[in-house]
Image (cartoon, rainbow, N blue to C red):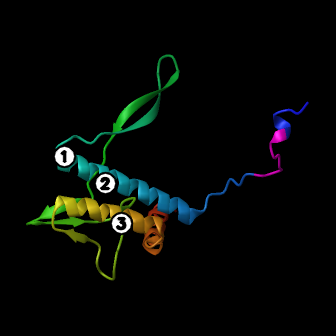
Amino acid sequence: MATVLSSLKIVTAVRSNQVNSVQFRREKMARKLLEQYNLAKSLRDGEQFVLKRIKTVTDKVSGETQQIEVTKRVNQWWWTEGSKILLQLKYGTKVLELAKGKNSIECSSGDELIKTLELVRTSVNNGELDVQIELASEGVRSRFKK
């Protein structure tokens, strides 16, 4: 009589705990760009954008820990200047330099801003901004060294 387990292919494998740092930074940047995209769409549609996260708090009296849902503030990476919208890409608090001496993308409307955020997210996932993200990451890490 055959068992269910005997019908499966069983192998020996070891899971790697190390994360590729380049891929990690790409995913982090892509997540932040998705937040900006959703924020821009919400503003265009007249809706309020709310991002929630889980926070662990400890009761001072009983010492019990519990998880609560709190809203996370998302700062816009763009602003309007006259009739144009200027977008800066940020990694942490560092603004990415997109070309020599240039750090902003100019958009003519809110719809173009949304399309631009989509395009930039695609370029991040394709690795086109890896060098700029690495430079910004080094700047962020250098503040932690004493």
> In x, y percent, where is residue 86?
20, 66
* Viewer-proximal residue among 87 and 94: 87
Which residue range is magenta in the image?
7-14
Outermost residue, top side: 62
Using residue 106 as the reference point, say whether residue 91 is left or right of it.
Answer: right
Mark 1 burial class by Cα count in 10 Å: few <14, some 14-19, many 20+: few
> In x, y percent, where is residue 136?
43, 68
Q: Secondary structure at mark 3?
A: helix
Q: Which residue in the structure is indicated by mark 1?
A: 45
Mark identifier at residue 36: 2
User: How many marks overall?
Assistant: 3
Residue shown at 86%/32% (left/top)? 3
Q: Secondary structure at mark 1?
A: helix
Residue shown at 31%/61% (left/top)? 117
Say whether residue 146 is visible.
Answer: no
Q: CA distance from mark 2 to mark 3?
A: 11 Å
Q: Which residue in the structure is indicated by mark 3?
A: 120
* Viewer-proximal residue among 145 and 141: 141
* Viewer-proximal residue among 90 and 40: 40
Mark identifier at residue 67: none
Question: Which of marks 3 and 1 precedes in the sequence?
Answer: 1
- Of the residues shown, which amino acid type is indicated by label 1? Asp
Question: Which of marks 1 and 2 precedes in the sequence?
Answer: 2
Q: CA distance from mark 2 to mark 1?
A: 14 Å
- Of the residues shown, which amino acid type is indicated by label 3? Val
Outermost residue, front side: 1
Q: CA distance from mark 1 to mark 3?
A: 21 Å
Depicted 121 relative to depicted 7: above or below: below
Question: Which of marks 3 and 2 precedes in the sequence?
Answer: 2
